[in-house]
Amino acid sequence: MAEITGRELHLVKKVLAIAMLAIERQPGPFQPYSDMQDMKGLLDLLAPGDTELTFYARAARIAVTGDPD
């Protein structure tokens, strides 16, 4: 398995947060909830601690909505 560190790890964390937010915003019965839960679990492993998770959640909001808050 590849070792992901540095900038690549940052990008993986950020894309997981963006994907989770996009799934949350998708209405209806076809929302891939299990995928979102798996992504959340992976992000929790890669970004332990509330401070880092908050950072990536904010980065995702900015990327998806353009609004930081």
Image: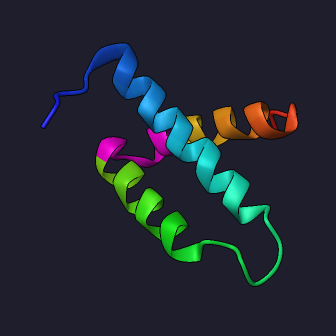
Q: Residue at x 75, y 84 (%)?
A: 29
Closer-to-camera residue (48/41)? 41
Q: Residue at x 58, y 75 (%)?
A: 33
In x, y percent, where is residue 37? 48, 69
The reply to whether the magenta stretch includes residue 34 is: no
Is residue 47 shown left or right of residue 31? Answer: left
Q: Residue at x 61, y 72 (%)?
A: 32
Q: Residue at x 25, y 26 (%)?
A: 4
Closer-to-camera residue (13/1)? 1
In x, y percent, where is residue 58? 67, 38
In the rendered view, how is the structure colored? Answer: rainbow
The reply to whether the magenta stretch includes residue 49 is: yes
The quarter of the picture where residue 64 lies is: top right
Residue reaching furthest top?
7
Residue reaching furthest bottom?
29
Residue reaching furthest left?
1
The quarter of the picture where residue 27 lies is: bottom right
Total numbered badges shown on the rendered structure? 0
Give the answer, above or below, for where 10 lies relative to 16. Answer: above
Can you say which quadrant of the picture contains the N terminus?
top left
Give the answer, above or below, for where 45 lies relative to 5. Answer: below
Is residue 53 shown left or right of residue 63? Answer: left
In x, y percent, where is residue 68? 80, 33
Which region is colored magenta? 46-53
Can you say which quadrant of the picture contains the C terminus?
top right
Give the answer, above or below, for where 21 lies relative to 69. Answer: below
Q: Main secondary structure of the magenta part?
A: helix
